[in-house]
Amino acid sequence: MKVLDRTEGVEYAIRDIISHAREYQKTGKDIIYLNIGDPVNYDFKTPQHIKEALIKAVMEDENYYTESEGLPELRQAIAEKENGKGFSVNEDDVLVTNGVSEALDMTMASVVNPNDQVLMPGPYYPPYASYAKFYGAHPVEFRVFSDGRADLDDLKSKITDKTRAICLISPNNPTGEVFSLNSLKEIVDIAAQHDLYIICDEIYDKIVFDDIFSGIGKVSRDLPVILLNGFSKVYLMTGWRCGYMCMNSNSPKLDNFRKNVPKLARVRIASNLPVQRAAVQALNGPQDHIKEMVHKLKNRRNFIVKRLNSIPGISCNLPRGAFYVFPQIDLNNRWKSDLDFVLDLLNNTGVLTVHGSGFGSSFGSDHFRIVYLAQEDILEDAMDRLETFLVRKLK
Ligand SMILES: Cc1ncc(COP(=O)(O)O)c(C=O)c1O
């Protein structure tokens, strides 16, 4: 029987590439996985006190359905965290979700109609486009410079009467770029002039290396800003699936959103209760692991960027947050596309990365994404293999 086109058309490059890796593995050779941004799969482990809170909740029989909007204590802790970053949100305007992924699904489901357009930073984290398309809308990319400024002329030129929202991801996946405060202000001013929703993903808010992070909250005023965030990355809880959305409490324009989106939360009953107990601990307990994680990641970032820039055919910007690099590759008529390059690299070296066009064709093509969560000896092995491969191919 037929399945609908909207389902058939769903793409997620980061995981879709794995089918090629499985084929390669059948040859019995090892793979260096640098394709999925899951720190818990590397040497970053969920802090002890967070694990203990989960176990305690389970053992104390907190295994029932909880409030659809989320555990009140957790909503309160989330509101406090986001208030601390300058965002005006009270606990009633927080919805706890099964990861940022579910919050994004609910948001797109609620703001776009078929044939609407949604602006997103090029390149972008693929589910932004996937969900927009699933609900019938068209993703439109705008240029972001490597110093964390949006290209405002490009952004303005892409706004039409069909544009409904601007998505921002800061720090971004796949580039690690972080929007500066001034750039955020310029973007929200444009959104305000055109009456657009602003959907901002700050899941990497505490994984920044060089500057102090500025969140959207500082410039949100009374604008219709929906902030998405979660516990996967900063609190090393990827597999537990916990995230949230915060609606700007100062924005009357969000009143319909505020009234109706919780219905989507109710219809899927609730998020996982023991995990929400652990999330309360994550926010209210010790934060020491974050400093350690950022320190380790900064060293790995510096190492990989230096190595990449010394390899012929590759140029790479210094990412200022998250744990990705997004080098440009000179395809040099050797490869038809960035996907072709990534597959050739995999098949010749066992190094698994993700093709840049999977993050949007306008600004992602001719690039590939590397996750630099692995320990330095593994990264070094991967860089050696990449270098040998490129030197041979580009001879
Ligand atoms: C920008 C961004 N948002 C959301 C997610 C997914 O978050 P979650 O695990 O909370 O669903 C990711 C995961 O890589 C991401 O990079």
Image (spheres, rainbow, N blue to C red):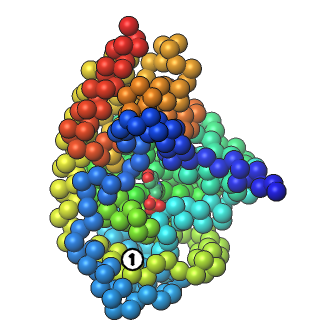
Q: Is residue 309 above or below residue 81?
A: above
Quarter where residue 164 is shown: bottom right
> Where is residue 6 shown, x and y percent of the image?
73, 53
- Whether residue 124 sits left or right of residue 10 in the image: it is left
> Where is residue 329 shown, x and y percent of the image?
43, 23
Q: Residue at x 25, y 32 (%)?
A: 381
Q: Residue at x 40, y 11 (%)?
A: 394
> Looking at numbered disc 1 in the image, what kind of residue is underneath it?
Val
Q: Residue at x 51, y 87 (%)?
A: 65
Helix, strand or loop at mark 1 = helix
> Where is residue 260 shown, x and y percent of the image?
65, 76
Who is closer to the viewer here, 11 or 68?
11
| Extreme residue toward the right, this view | 1
Q: Which residue is mark 1?
A: 275
Res. 147 in view:
yes
Who is closer to the viewer here, 114 or 144?
114
Q: Is residue 51 above or below residue 26?
A: below
- Whether residue 207 sits left or right of residue 229 in the image: it is left
